[in-house]
Image (cartoon, rainbow, N blue to C red):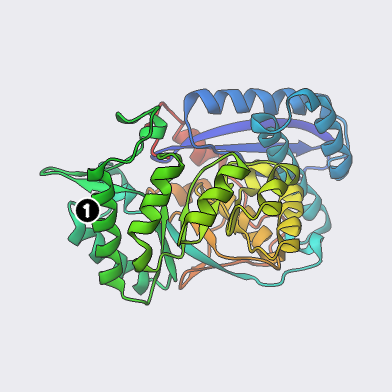
Amino acid sequence: MKISDFKTLHADAGRSFSFLKVITDKGIIGWSEYTGISEIIRRKGLTALIESMLQPLIGKDPREIERITSDLYSMTRQSLSGLNHQAIGAIQNALLDITAKSMEVPVYRLFGGPLRTRIPMYWSHFGTYRLQRSNQIYQKKLIRDLDGMAAHAKDVMEQGYSALKTKIHYFDETRGTGYFPCFGSEPGAPELNLSPSILRTIIHQMTALREAVGDELDLILDLNSNFKADGIIRIARAIEHLNIRWLEVDVFDSDVLRDIRERSPLPIGGCEMLCTAKTYTPFFARRSVDVPLVDVTWNGFLESVKIASVADVFDLNVSPHNFTSYLATQINGHFAAVTPNLELMEFDVDEVPWLSDFFTDPLRIENGYLVLTEKPGWGMDINEQAVRERPASTLVNLA
């Protein structure tokens, strides 16, 4: 079997989703997803890297995944990690899909079989797509105040999810919005100071959610990169009494994150934007994080398994970072199936009504669990016609 061609596709689903198609001379096609947290610039840049790396692979056996991965590492040795590694991850995941399909087994069968085929998930981006985004697109009930957020949290419990993760949301007389200075969506960068008003907003938001759900639902607060270390610690201390499952932060220095963790009364989650086990290891060795997040679409399945194995050495459970579309959910689900030290898997429940049109098979979600099947490969392919009917465009980034 040889790689004969490849193609990249981009779809509009309220935000853009990107897919890689690798074609073989035997008619077996492998798919992966490589959606990122920004839009046009990142999408074009990563696509160009993927295409440039794949061109020399024409004529190679797609089942020689370790050999191909090693060669791609060698090609990018002077600029490892970042987009280069995410490009390798996208290629690797598509090759795994081909390999599993050629053997007529699910990907998780290639790694010793599943420990679980029901994957526990938490509701991510809670409330985000029900604020300033048009509910004409998402067709969700618009949230206009904290009472609306509290009522929505009860919906999460009724649908069987055991936890939710929310960002910082605040409201005025006309609408609610998110707080994201680190992404340039509003003033506050580059200093990223915690103001009294934002601290008060966080306290009121998380208190309203805890009062709404009692002790029946775990709450996770994602601060992204919106504050420096002192602000993160002040927030952790201010909401200590609310029994937060973990406070999620994006900090790239293991010593700084260790200091935050030592001074925080709440468990700390993080590392979601890191690539490679070598990059994660200092965070584990320095005891910098309680819940490491691993993005399987960015790292690639093989590297993600290595990261989880290193985390297990330090008695840490990992959480798949999965904020993208349904193919990525399947890929992360297969990773969760073979990972002994699993915490919870992230999942964006609120999506546009037509998102499922992009895939040949539906997601199976039962009471907050992703249910994997025995279908070969990732368990779903891309409906190219549906993707072509909704091409990606310039869209707003809500992280």
Return the x and y of residue 215 as percentages of the image width and height: 36, 76
Residue closer to the observer: 26 or 239:
239
Q: Is residue 214 above or below residue 395?
A: below
Q: How many marks are shown on the rendered structure? A: 1
Q: Is residue 146 visible?
A: yes
- Which image quarter holds the C terminus? top left
Return the x and y of residue 339 as percentages of the image width and height: 70, 64
Query: What type is the residue that disc 1 sits on?
Result: Ile
- Which image quarter holds the N terminus? top right
Which residue is at 54% across, 28% downward?
Answer: 43
Q: Is residue 353 visible?
A: no
Residue closer to the observer: 133 or 255:
255
Q: Quadrant of residue 334?
A: bottom right
Q: In this view, does 119 lie to the left or right of 211?
A: right
Which residue is outermost to the left?
A: 173
Q: Name the residue under label 1.
A: 143
Return the x and y of residue 187 as percentages of the image width and height: 30, 28
Return the x and y of residue 119 as percentages of the image width and height: 58, 68
Which residue is at 33% across, 57% downward?
Answer: 238
